Amino acid sequence: MDIKSKIEALRKEINSHNYRYYVENYPVISDFDFDVLLRELQDMESSYPQFDDINSPTKRVGSDQSNGFESVKHRYPMLSLSNTYSQDELSDFCRKVEEELESSVEYVCELKFDGTAICIIYEDGKLLKAVTRGDGTSGDDVTENVRTINSVPLELHGSGYPDYFEVRGEILLPYSSFDRLNADRELNDEQPFANPRNAAAGTLKLQNSSVVAKRNLDCYIYNLLGENLPYKNHYDNIQQLKKWGFKVSEHVKRCSNINDIWSYVESIDKLRVELPYATDGVVVKVNRYDIQKQLGTTAKAPKWSVAYKFKAEQALTKLISVDFQVGRTGAITPVANLEPVQLAGTTVKRASLHNSDQITLLDIRVGDMVYVEKGGEIIPKITEVELSMRSSESEVFEYIFSCPECGTPLVRFEGEAKSYCPNQGGCAPQILGRIEHFVARKGMNIDGLGGETIVLLHNNGLVNNIADLYSLRHDQLESLPRLGTKSADNIVKGVANSRNIPFSRVLFALGIRFVGETTAKYIASHFKTLDAIMSASVEQLIEADEVGSKIAESIQDYFKDENNLDIIRRLSAANLQMSAESVELVSDNLSGKSFVISGSFILHSRDELKAIIEQHGGKILSSVSSNTNYLIAGTKIGPAKLTKATKLNIKIISENEFINMVSPSVDVKVNTIEIENVNNITQGSLF
Ligand code: IVH
C-alpha cells in the first residue's frame, strides 16, 4: 500500500472508532489500541506533511456535543492531556520540564479518573452552569443534570471564594451503580453500557434530569480556574476546594522528582483495584502556576502536565470455539470459548464478542491466539488477535445465517448490530426466556417456577407460551418427575395469585421489546386499559411519558402478531388484570389541570397525593414541562425541578395549597391547627 493510501486507511479506521466511542457509546477496541493507532497516524502525518488534511482525526480532540443541549463557549479552553504508557517517556517529561526551567520543580500527582470531563461555573458562591468538554472550545450545557449529582455543591461552604470561577473535574459512575444500571438495562432489553465511562457520559446527556438523579453519578474536582484564586499553586487550591464543599480525591500528592513520581504510580497501580470507581492512570502536573504559564501549552494540551496511563490487564489465550446464544427476544449474541487463563485474579473461560461487526473488524478466527481484557466491563472482551501466532491454515470466521437452536434464517434490522431469530413461537430459548421473564419477581411473581421447572414443563408439552400456565392442573404437575405434591401446590397457588398482579406489571411481564418496568407503569397509567393500548396509534402511544417512537413501534409490532393476540385473549379469559384500577371521581375540581409532585410531604404520601389528583379529575406528569400547570413542592425537592418550573412560569404550590384546591371534599384526616403548623414547616424549609 502506498503512503497516501495507508494514511487514508488509518484515518478511516480511527474515524470509525471515534464514531463508536462518541456517538454509539460502544467502543470495540481498548483505549490503548486506539492511542496506538492515533500515534501511528500522527507520526505518518508529520513525516509526510504533503498529505495533511484539516479533517484528519488527529486535528481534533473529539467532540461529545449532541443535539438538544445549548452550546456554551468555554471561557478557558478545555484542553486534553498528552498520554504515555511508558516509564521512559514519563522521565522524559520531567527532564524536559527541568531543562527548560534550568531547575528542579515540584509536581503534583493525582489519579486519572476514567469518566467524563465537566466544567462547573460558580458565581457569587452559587452553581451557575455546568458544561461538557465538547470540542474543547465549546460544550453542551448540562446544568440541570449536574445539579442532581449530590457531590456537586449547589452553594459553597465557607468563604474567600472569587466572585467568578470555574472548576474542572470528572463525572463518574461508581462500579456498583454501573452494575445495577446494566442489570436493569439487560432486563429491559436495552443495550448495556460497555463500561462506567460510557455510562457516565451517556447519563450526563439524558434529557430527563430525574432519570439522571436516580443513577447515582459522582464528581471529583481536579482543577480550579479563574482570577484572584486564593493560592498561586495547584495543590493548595485543590485543598481549598475541599473547604468550599467540593469532592477532591484524597490521593493527591506533591512529588519533587521522577523517583517520587514513580513510587506514586506504583502505589496507585496497586490501590486502584480497590477503588469503587474506574481510574486509568496517573496525572502529573507542575504545581506552581507561574511555572505552568512559563511552560505554556500546545494547541491541544498543556506542556506542564502529562498522563501516565495504565495498560488494562490483558491475557493471551486461544480461541477454541464460538457459541451463539439466543435471547428471549431472539437476539443472537456470539460468545467466545477460550482456553482458561488467569486475568485480574479470576479464571477467564468465556468472553463477549458482542456482534458480527466486531468479529469482522478484529478478523477473529477460531484457533487464533487472542488478547482478552477486563476494563470496567463485567464480562471480559477480546481486544486483539496476535497475528504473528496465527496458523497458516486458519480460515476467516463465517458468521451464522440461521438460528443455532431452531435453524430459522436470521434477520438483521436496519441500524441494529445484532441479528435476530424471527421464529418467536417455535424457538425453544425464546419460548423459555419469555416464560421466565413472565413469571419473574418483577413481573407476575409466580413462586415455584424456576428455570429448570419451566424446561421440565416445556419438555413435557405442558407449556409452550405464557397463557398455557393458566391451564396447568395439579394432577399434571404432580405426576412429573422431580415435582411432588408440594411443588405442584406451590405452582398452582402462585399461578392463581398472579391474577391479582396489577395491570402495569402484567404489561411489563408480556415482554414487549423495550417496554421495561418503568415504561410499563407510565403506559398503564396513561391508557388505563390494554384495549386502549392495542388500539392506539404511534402518535397516541408517544403521548405517554417516557415513550418514544422506537417503543411505540415495538408495541404496535407486538399487537400485530396473531400469536400474541391469541395469548392476550387467553390471558384475559384467565382473568388477569387487563386494566388499571378505575378511579372513582370525587369531583372534577382539577379537571384539565396537570401536576408534578416532587419532594417529601408531611400529610400524605406521594401515592396518596396522586390518588387525590386522580379522584378530582387531574392529571399526573412525571417531569416538569410546558404542559405542567402546578408543581406540588415538598421538602427536599430536587433543585432542578424548582429551577425548571420557575423558568417555565409554572405555579409552585405547597401540599396545603394543593389540598385547599380540592377542599372541602378531601378528607385531610388532621385538624386545622395541625395543618397550619405543617404549612409553616413546608414553607419555611422551601422558600
Ligand atoms: S487535568 C489541562 N486531572 O483526562 C489539563 N484531567 O485527557 C486538563 N482526567 O478529559 C485535565 N483525571 O477529563 C486532569 N486528575 C485529572 C484527571 C483528568 C481525569 C481526564 C480529563 C480530561 C482527560 C485528559
Image (cartoon, rainbow, N blue to C red):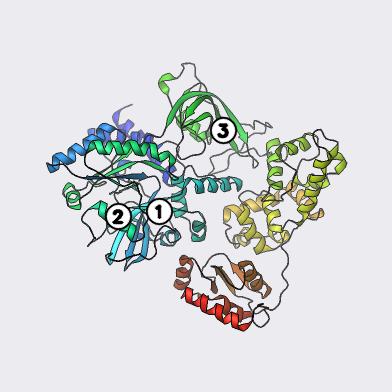
Rendered image: mark on residue 219: 1
Q: Is residue 531 above or below residue 109?
A: below
Pointers 1 and 3 in contact (CB under 8 A)? no
Residue at mark 2 to residue at mark 3: CA–CA distance: 49 Å
Label 1 or label 3, whichever lies nearer to me, is: 1
Residue at mark 1 to residue at mark 2: CA–CA distance: 16 Å
Q: Amino acid at mark 1?
A: Cys
The image quadrant where one finds the N terminus is top left
Q: Is residue 295 above or below residue 598?
A: above
Residue position marked by numbered label 2 in the rendering: 239
Q: Is residue 309 visible?
A: yes
Residue position marked by numbered label 3 in the rendering: 334
Q: Secondary structure at mark 2?
A: helix
Q: Is residue 389 above or below residue 408?
A: above
Front-most of 160 and 427?
160
Q: Is residue 277 above or below residue 685?
A: above
Q: Position of residue 79 (x, y in %)?
A: 29, 49
Q: Residues within 10 Å of mark 2 (few under 14, many from 20)?
A: some
Front-most of 432 and 329?
432
Label 2 or label 3, whichever lies nearer to me, is: 2
